[in-house]
Amino acid sequence: ETGVTQTPRHLVMGMTNKKSLKCEQHLGHNAMYWYKQSAKKPLELMFVYSLEERVENNSVPSRFSPECPNSSHLFLHLHTLQPEDSALYLCASSQDQGSIQYFGAGTRLSVL
Amino acid sequence: EDKVVQSPLSLVVHEGDTVTLNCSYEVTNFRSLLWYKQEKKAPTFLFMLTSSGIEKKSGRLSSILDKKELFSILNITATQTGDSAVYLCAVCTTSGTYKYIFGTGTRLKVLA
């Protein structure tokens, strides 16, 4: 148990659906991250929040929309996804930016 | 473009063997190098290295960083089947904001 909890663990959605991924950290950290992990590719950093403000958006398509309502919670809102968006989505948190990141178990997303 | 390369991509050994995993990098504004173990879903933190030549050790695992030659190694001695996992290397850079660049990982399988 890393102190970072992600729900749901698995998600299957059609291309016209709207869904949200949730991440909660119980570590008192100030920074939270969303990563995409596709088969045989490195983890891709999608979004970074520090003290609830977005500080990084790595050219992610607008069909992915993050939300950080407080320092313990991070959401990734999904709409009109494409099959190539199927991947493992990992959330992480760290005490501050540049510190050790602690990861959740991820959400396995399949887009049909 | 910042880059992290891990080798080998995969490795199969027998219990009791010693393995060395490699991570080389080409980045600007290096801050730290991190090693993670990913068994099923959540990468779990192993080591964070910031200084050259200082070995970090935890049980049978150890790691060292060479900032001149731009690489790190992760050693595992007396391997056990529980060491089977993907080992991820990440480099943290800072140039205004912090970024984490991951390698594709080394998949280690330890046979009984």
Image (spheres, helix red, strand yellow):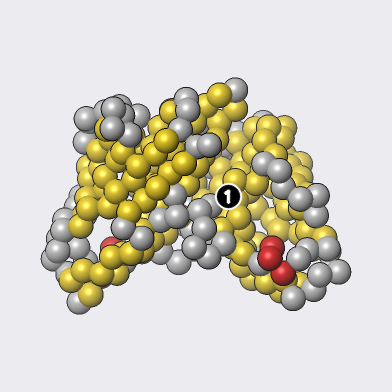
Q: Position of residue A18 (x, y in %)?
A: 83, 64
What chain does mark 1 sit on? A
Q: Position of residue A41 (x, y in %)?
A: 52, 58
Left or right, A63 with respect to B23, comes to right
The residue labelled by disc 1 is: A44
Tell me if I can see residue A37 in this picture: yes
Q: Position of residue A88 (x, y in %)?
A: 59, 62
Left or right, A9 with respect to B73, comes to right
**Camera-nearest residue between B4 and B37:** B4
**Camera-nearest residue between A6 and B80:** B80
Q: Circle 1 — which element?
A: strand
Considering every residue shown, the one lying at the far front of the view is B1
Q: Position of residue A55 (x, y in %)?
A: 68, 32
- Residue at the spot x=20%, y=77% of the render? B112
In this view, B26 is above or below A7: above
Q: Quadrant of residue B76?
A: bottom left
In this view, A110 is above or below A76: below
